[in-house]
Image (cartoon, helix red, strand yellow):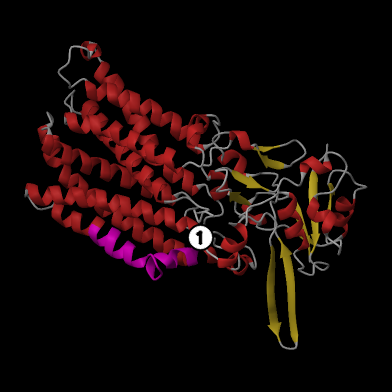
């Protein structure tokens, strides 16, 4: 008998991380292309963005109960997951076409088409923003999940996707230097700024949930401040994943700034793991929690004796 | 227009769990899946004024079901008579509907990989029989029928009694009414 979860697991959190970071990378590269007069971010960064999205899709498929039916997730235009799947598909194709223009192969025939860079950048910007944001929309619409419900989580996910995308671009620029060198050098400052916003937003979000909303939301938020998730949240996400990189990014030292970028990525994944874990909280109906405690977990001796 | 609903009279329910067992047996559910739990509420109050009640739970077959729009594969569907069900052959097991349902009425079947739930025993009421949980209840605490038929028992009970719907503030508009 399986003890698999009845809620989303860590693989969806990893999917959200890679998809979000990939979306953030697409947005960053697109903004630089459109506002920088045609200069581009590093080749590694431009190719890693869609690659991240593909990795995210891989984890999403592994999370499914029926992975071979994955094509069916495109079927319902009213479902946020379907919108995300379609948008991500367009984003991956467009971003790979854009990133491939830096490769020195004659087969990249579209490289010389007039304006193709800007057109793909516009597509990447829109689809990247959607991919960066849609997990937050998906979670915010879950009426029965008190920690998620509401528009705030959408902002948290969008911000995290942008900052992780920028951090990933910074690290990629260390591997293959970015033609937009001045922009690349300014990225740590942008990371520090966004991390400051992230810190304020998260503190505000937790405070509002804990003090200003329903009892179920307050209890869900307390798991983050004083419950079983508080250590991972405070030490992992707030300290290691937000404050530490914020400080390190301000040092004019490439090693410190690279460490900051790596910590931002770590913080992004910790955040998503915690958020998905908080989906275990539901507005439970009277007597439901006590009832669920009595249900078999699958490891009981009598089940193994009689059923197997 | 037919609109199926269920009325649960909590004054009659004695918490015997016969409905839970009947549903489990007839739907051949795995050990960890329960479509029809009966929870115990209480005891509440101060001695000697104590009270205990039982709350049968099931899929609410909401008029505004969040699970249907959440399903990316259109496996989760709502019929015109209001019954919400899962078409197993389309389900990809993404658990979006489980996360969307505020009532915990959906369950991931680990053996098949898909999601399953109460469907009001639609294969039974289509041939004039009652759902298993209704037919089994010896206390007649469960009543099932067409809410849009003014002569039906459910319609009369809803009009003639004080009823509540669970989590009505979420605007799901459940089709299960509780008399308390």
Q: In this view of the protein, which residue sits in the foreground, B83 or B139? A: B139
Q: Secondary structure at mark 1?
A: loop
| Residue B50 horizontal/vertical position (percent) | 73, 82
State the residue at coordinates (34%, 41%).
A20
Q: Which residue is mark 1?
A: A281
From where the camera sits, is residue B179 visible?
A: yes
Q: Against A112, is A287 above or below?
A: below
For residue A211: magenta?
Answer: no
| Principal secondary structure, stretch drawn in magenta | helix
Q: Against A191, is A205 above or below?
A: below
| Residue B157 horizontal/vertical position (percent) | 87, 56
Q: In this view of the protein, which residue sits in the foreground, A284 or B17? A: B17
Question: In the displayed structure, does residue A113 sit left or right of residue B28?
Answer: left
Question: In the displayed structure, does residue A46 sit left or right of residue A307?
Answer: left
Q: In this view of the protein, which residue sits in the foreground, B81 or A246? A: B81
Looking at the image, which residue sits at the far right? B151
| Residue B45 horizontal/vertical position (percent) | 70, 82
Looking at the image, which residue sits at the far bottom? B48
Q: Chain of mark 1?
A: A
Question: In the displayed structure, does residue B134 sit left or right of residue B62?
Answer: right
What is the magenta range? A217-240
For residue A234: magenta?
Answer: yes
Q: Decide: few, some or many residues near mark 1? Use Cα within 10 Å; few <14, some 14-19, many ≥20.
A: some
| Residue A217 horizontal/vertical position (percent) | 50, 62
- Quadrant of the rendering where the C terminus of chain A is positioned: bottom right
What is the number of callouts on the image? 1
State the residue at coordinates (34%, 45%).
A17
State the residue at coordinates (19%, 54%).
A245
């Amino acid at each position: 008998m399986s003890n698999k979860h009845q809620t989303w697991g860590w693989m969806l959190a990893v999917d959200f991380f890679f998809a979000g970071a990939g979306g953030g990378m697409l947005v960053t590269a697109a903004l630089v292309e459109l506002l920088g007069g045609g200069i581009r971010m590093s080749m590694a960064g431009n190719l890693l963005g869609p690659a991240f999205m593909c990795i995210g899709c891989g984890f999403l498929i592994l999370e499914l109960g029926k992975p071979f039916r994955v094509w069916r997730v495109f079927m319902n235009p009213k479902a946020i997951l379907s919108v995300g799947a379609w948008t991500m598909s367009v984003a991956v194709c467009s971003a790979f076409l854009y990133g491939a223009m830096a490769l020195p192969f004659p087969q990249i025939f579209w490289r010389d088409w007039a304006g193709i860079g800007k057109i793909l950048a516009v597509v990447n910007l829109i689809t990247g923003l959607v991919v960066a944001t849609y997990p937050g929309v998906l979670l915010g619409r879950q009426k029965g999940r008190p920690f998620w419900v509401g528009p705030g989580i959408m902002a948290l996910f969008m911000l995290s996707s942008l900052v992780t995308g920028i951090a990933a671009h910074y690290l990629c620029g260390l591997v293959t230097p970015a033609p937009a060198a001045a922009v690349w050098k300014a990225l740590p400052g942008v990371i520090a700024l966004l991390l400051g916003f992230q810190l304020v937003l998260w503190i505000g979000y937790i405070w509002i949930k804990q003090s200003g909303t329903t009892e179920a939301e307050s209890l869900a938020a307390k798991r983050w401040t004083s419950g079983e998730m508080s250590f991972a949240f405070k030490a992992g996400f707030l300290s290691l994943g937000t404050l530490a990189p914020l400080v390190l990014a301000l040092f004019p030292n490439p090693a410190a700034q690279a460490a900051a970028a790596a910590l931002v990525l770590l913080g992004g994944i910790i955040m998503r793991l915690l958020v998905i874990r908080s989906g275990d909280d539901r507005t439970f109906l009277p007597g439901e929690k006590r009832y669920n405690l009595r249900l078999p977990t699958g490891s009981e001796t009598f089940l193994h004796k009689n059923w197997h | 227009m037919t609109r199926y609903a269920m009325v649960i009279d909590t004054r009659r329910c004695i918490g015997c769990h016969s409905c839970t067992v009947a549903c489990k047996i007839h739907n051949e559910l795995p050990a960890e899946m329960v479509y029809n739990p009966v929870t115990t509420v209480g005891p509440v109050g101060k001695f000697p004024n104590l009270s205990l009640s039982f709350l049968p739970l099931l899929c609410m077959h909401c008029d505004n079901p969040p699970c249907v729009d959440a399903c990316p594969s259109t496996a989760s569907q709502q019929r015109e008579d209001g019954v919400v069900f899962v078409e197993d052959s389309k389900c990809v097991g993404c658990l979006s509907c489980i996360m969307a349902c505020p009532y915990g009425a959906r369950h991931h079947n680990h053996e098949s990989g898909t999601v399953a739930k109460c469907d009001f025993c639609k294969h039974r009421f289509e041939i004039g029989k009652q759902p298993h949980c209704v037919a089994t209840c010896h206390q007649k605490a469960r009543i099932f029928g067409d809410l849009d038929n003014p002569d039906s028992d459910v319609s009369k009970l809803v009009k003639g009694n004080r009823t509540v719907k669970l989590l009505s503030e979420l605007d799901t508009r459940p089709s299960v009414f509780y008399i308390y």
